[in-house]
Image (cartoon, rainbow, N blue to C red):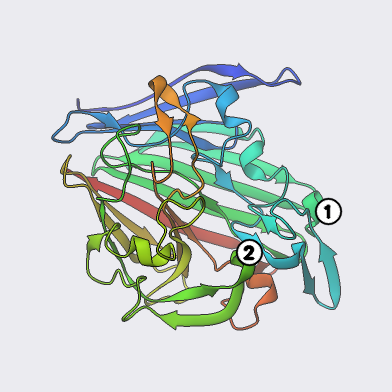
Amino acid sequence: MGGMKINAKPFGVLSDGSDVTLYILEAGDIALSITDFGAAWTSLLVPGKTGRDDLLLGFSSLEGYFHCPFFGATIGRFANRIGGAAFTLEGKTFGLCKNDGPNTLHGGRRGFGRRLWKAEPYRDRRGVFVRFELESAGGDEGFPGRLRAEVTYGLNGSNELSASYRAWVDAPCPVNLTNHAYFNLAGEGSGDILSHELRLHASSYVEPGPDLIPTGKLIPVGGTPFDFTARKPVSRDYAAVCGGDPAAAGRGYDHCFVIDGYAPDGTLRPCAEAFDPSSGRSLSVFTTQPGVQFYSGNFLDGIRGKTGSVYNKNAGFCLETQHFPDSPNQDGFPSAVFGPAKDYRERAVFSFDW
């Protein structure tokens, strides 16, 4: 393939008449498509033994992204769950939208993954990129302060997809941005990901309580089904995680793992490696964040995706680099509160090989 290119084409129109655009980035043998609706990754073409396949679950048209389970979306203001849809900050309690039972999930009913971002494609000596910007008014979904988010996704000539997350807010507020891409290294629509092999640079995980809200405890992974410190097939301990019933809807991995070596200084460090034996493709993830949510696609239930694919349970997996869930209500977790004196800046890198 070779070379670096950026192209743009129409991707649909919203109900208010706003045009939606799809940006196609090419660098070497990899091509990434991103739309300004939700700043969502819609496809990722990567070579392998089986040819050049699309590794992302998604849709061929805009309409599919209106109500899907966050395929490829940029999540904010706060990724993952906030227990009781509320938090207290500086003596004041803020009530949020209850869009996941009694809790808040991925920023509320209309989080950042459901909005039209301002987009600016560009290229420089490092690669090809799209910079997305979004304004969020004070009180948006219940969160305090006016916030401006800037998220940049790009490809370089070293088979890397980079993600840069920045935010500025004029009052103290929890901020936690991530991308919710669903990967299948064998190619989307090619079956489940249980034969994928996974390693996580995590010696502990965040213990989930009812409704997946953390108990506040960090549990060592040793001797548990959550031990991915050595690479193993996702399937190996899957039945144990599912309580002995792997077919049960919603059961499987949906846990935040504590990435080793965290320091709040922006150091990029190893997070995860995934490998698919059938295609020979591997994915290595690096992050500045304290955690990563490993989700094994437990709630996928026959969603009709691109090119006639049907996404059933375990059709894809997510590695969402992030602060811990419910951090605003957990004093023992790394702080996810940012504000006028503290800007939000995080990075992630997704590196591919075949």
Is 20 above or below relative to 186?
above
Residue type at mark 1: give it: Gly
Camera-side residue of 296 and 272: 296
Residue position marked by numbered label 2 in the rendering:
211
Q: What element carries label 2?
A: helix
Q: Residue 350 carries which label?
A: none
Camera-side residue of 250 and 154: 250
**Dots 1, 2 in contact, CB < 8 A:** no
| Crowd around label 2: few <14 · some 14–19 · many ≥20 (10 Å) | few
Residue position marked by numbered label 1 in the rendering:
139
The quarter of the rendered structure image containing the C terminus is top left
- Residue 87 is situated, as x and y percent measured from the top left of the image, at 76, 69
**Which residue lies at the image location 54% right of the left edge and 32% below the top edge?**
120
- Residue 180 is situated, as x and y percent measured from the top left of the image, at 50, 47
**Which residue lies at the image location 28% right of the left edge and 42% below the top edge?**
185
Question: In the rendered structure, which disc, 1 or 2, sits on the residue that comes first in sequence?
Answer: 1
Using the rendered image of the protein, determine whether residue 99 is visible from the camera's viewpoint.
Answer: yes
Quadrant of res 279 = top left
Is 60 above or below relative to 227?
above
- Residue 220 is situated, as x and y percent measured from the top left of the image, at 39, 82
Tag nearer the camera, 1 or 2: 2
Q: Is mark 1 on a helix, strand or loop?
A: loop
**What is the distance, in whole Å, between disc 1 and disc 2 at their CAs?**
25 Å
- Direction from residue 97 to residue 82 in the image, left or right: left
- Direction from residue 170 to residue 346 in the image, left or right: left
Quadrant of res 262 = bottom left
